[in-house]
Amino acid sequence: MSRVFNFSAGPSTLPESVLEICAKEMLDCHGTGQSVMEMSHRSAAYKPIIEGCEAKIRDLMHIPDNYRVLFLQGGASLQFAMIPLNLNKTGRAAYVDTGVWSKKAIEEARRFLTTVDVVASSRDRGCCYIPEIRKIEGDYDYVHITLNNTIYGTKWSYLPDTGDIPLVCDCSSNILSEPIDVTKFGVLYAGAQKNLAPAGVTLVIIRDDLIREDLPASVPTMLRYDTHAKNGSMFNTPPCYSIYVMGLVLDWVKSCGGAEGMKKRNEEKAACLYDFLDSSDYYHATVEKGSRSLMNVPFLTKETDPEKAAVINKKFVSEAAKAGLVNLAGHRLVGGMRASIYNAMSLEGVQALVAFMKKFAAENPID
């Protein structure tokens, strides 16, 4: 069977050239006679893999020396707890609620902090836009935003001015999709399974002054950033294979022109799909212009009857899969369809999707 175009929101498609290297090196990585899956994380064979991965991410994201790069586990969801546990000083934090994952982060923070203020929200219009909040002030330990909202398909086109308050950001679904100025943030974190690697490793980029050793004894050892910073992300066995694949993906990103090249590539793909949706009499994008993600594109048909729409949606997803376009079902909270067009998705894949959408509309008219 030939490879399909995989529009999954995560785990997502990986560059074919990376998968080919993984296959080639599965039994013998770099002449060691062993797979990375078998290597001791403290061995001479593995050391250049993890150190090289850090060097590559520092280079591609222009990470300053006063930031640490950590390879952790538990996904972004564990960071929802680690952030308040490690940054808590006054017990106060500000969050902007733009969707499912920001809501989960808010709920987790409320387990540990006395005050979690939702200073802006897009729920009044079903999270189809990014709220306008250019400046955030207050006696907060940090401000938290979700830079790209995987489920609703929105992304921040600007960063709020937080002054001296550290800005913390979940960038799981758009990391390295375009340049990010790391110096604007206190903490950036990303589950790898969208743009970086297979699931299993979580990238955390944290400013040195936010890595505290004076945390309460009640904070578990594994949930302290200083634990991992002091031990080079090797306090326990790290997700060795995912880090290895991340290094290969980073090589691929650099070969494509780095974050700047990815932005150009992703804007071209997104324009192909959004331009079609905006000109269609059959489909429409669910996100307002100005807030649209380059990575996740939810869309609906213009069928207004809910029961008929559900039937059409199901048929669309089924027939798309038969055509080699898989994982196009929208999230259950949004419905409809969603195309996740992460870095590794080709323009050819998006063009194939648009061609299928035209064909489907012609063959399945709406009354």
Image (cartoon, helix red, strand yellow):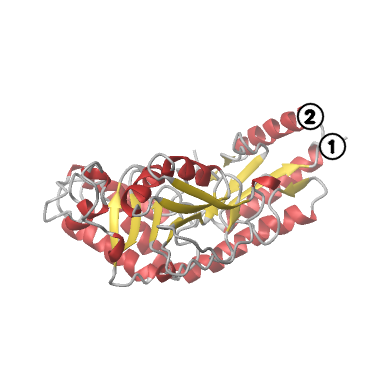
Label 2, residues with CA under 10 Å away: few <14, some 14-19, many ≥20: few
Expressed as whole percent of the image width and height from the top left, the position of residue 196 reads 40, 54
In the rendered structure, the answer to whether residue 301 lies left or right of residue 329 reads right
The quarter of the image holding the C terminus is top right
Expressed as whole percent of the image width and height from the top left, the position of residue 99 reads 57, 46
Which one is nearer the viewer's eye here, 299 or 135? 135
Marks 1 and 2 sit apart, C-alpha to C-alpha, by 9 Å
Q: Which residue is mark 1?
A: 366
The quadrant holding residue 211 is: bottom left
User: In this rendering, is residue 124 above or below 321?
Assistant: below
Q: Amino acid at mark 1?
A: Ile
Expressed as whole percent of the image width and height from the top left, the position of residue 361 reads 78, 42
| Dot 1 and dot 2 residues touching (CB under 8 Å) | yes
User: In this rendering, is residue 126 above or below 181?
Assistant: above
Mark 2 or mark 1, which is nearer the start of the sequence?
2
SS label for mark 1: loop
SS label for mark 2: helix
**Any part of residue 142 in sight:** yes
Q: Which residue is mark 2?
A: 308
Q: Amino acid at mark 2?
A: Lys
The quadrant holding residue 169 is: bottom left
Expressed as whole percent of the image width and height from the top left, the position of residue 93 reads 44, 53
Residue drawn at 24 percent across, 47 percent down: 216
Disc 1 versus disc 2: nearer the observer: 2
